Image (cartoon, grey):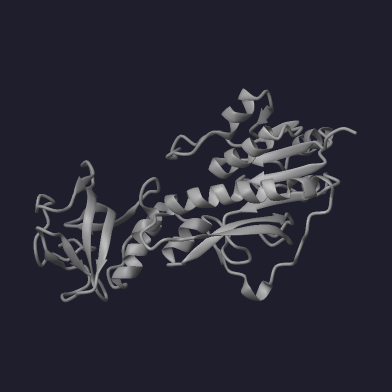
Amino acid sequence: MNEPGIVIFAYHDVGYECLSALIGRGERIPAVFTHPDSPGENVWFRSVADLARRHGIAVHTPDSLGDPAWIARVRDMNPDLIFSFYYRNIIPQEVLDLPRLGAFNMHGSLLPRYRGRAPVNWAVLNGEKETGATLHHMIMRPDAGDIVDQEPVPIGPDETARDVFEKVTRAARRVLERRIDALKTGIAPRRPQDESQATAFGRRRPEDGRIDWTRSAQSIYNLIRAVTHPYPGAFTHAGGRKVAIWWARPLPGGGGRPGEVLSTDRLRVAAGSGSLEIVKMQRDGANEEEAGGGAHGLRTGQVLGGTS
């Protein structure tokens, strides 16, 4: 009997790791659908397309899968299974209905919490202590299908979104490896998601990194670690000039108005409650720099976030 054919829709590191796991097992993969890298994006992750091509797998990068011609091409591949691993485009229902063994998605959270885009960044920003990877049946409602399996990972108090994403990526691979045989034989477990526990979040834009100094120091710190490198970063303004804050430490002591520079040698800024020591920063048009030592051009009493 022929091995089931698996058509894969994948991108980013989760896509790379999961595709690598299936290639390593010798699975039959007629094609991989992925995305061309965007010229305006910081591409810090590994290439699904390169991995597939190195192993002689056909690679397709359609702008949309809604074109009837692309639906027909997938149908001609006669997939037994479909996987989506961090693929960004909507996969039409006509495609999801094709595989006899089902279509499955790998999501970077413990569903039903954190449905939607950028789940790891949102979890870090919200100060969560745990997230994970979930393999689930695909339906047209995003991230809402029955769960096959999931694996939690802890979020450390000083971990960045990238740190956590690397752990989620490894967890995703383990979940897939744990369930692939059952999926190929149609006996994988499934359990409905508890809709009463569902939360959903939208995509994040660079503008969402603006610091609100009236928030607590811990809340601002969570934002900084959620969007620091390789993401666009948290930022404020000083004297009308944009300043990126790449790293900071929350401190218990406050005083002063929110956003007020309390000291400059050890750059400390007041928050709504508590304060932050700014560790790494970058003024618009300048290089990233260590904030200690007073060379940052800020002055005591200056209020960040405005034009002072």
> Residue 266 or 242: which is nearer the viewer?
266
Left or right of residue 100, residue 260 in this image: left
Residue drawn at x 27%, y 75% is: 272
Residue 59 figure quarter: top right
Q: In which quarter of the image is the N terminus?
A: top right
> Residue 236 or 58: which is nearer the viewer?
58
Toward the right, the furthest residue is 1
- Counting labels gives 0
Report x, y in % for residue 149.
Answer: 69, 58
Is residue 101 shown above or below 156?
above
Residue 63 visible in image: no
Left or right of residue 43, residue 304 in this image: left
Residue drawn at x 40%, y 48% is: 231
Residue drawn at x 78%, y 39% is: 71
Q: In which quarter of the image is the C terminus?
A: bottom left
Report x, y in % for residue 194.
Answer: 69, 72
> Residue 27 or 272: which is nearer the viewer?
27
Residue 78 visible in image: yes
Left or right of residue 110, residue 259 in this image: left
Left or right of residue 94, residue 281 in this image: left
Report x, y in % for residue 298.
Answer: 12, 57
Report x, y in % for residue 293.
Answer: 10, 52
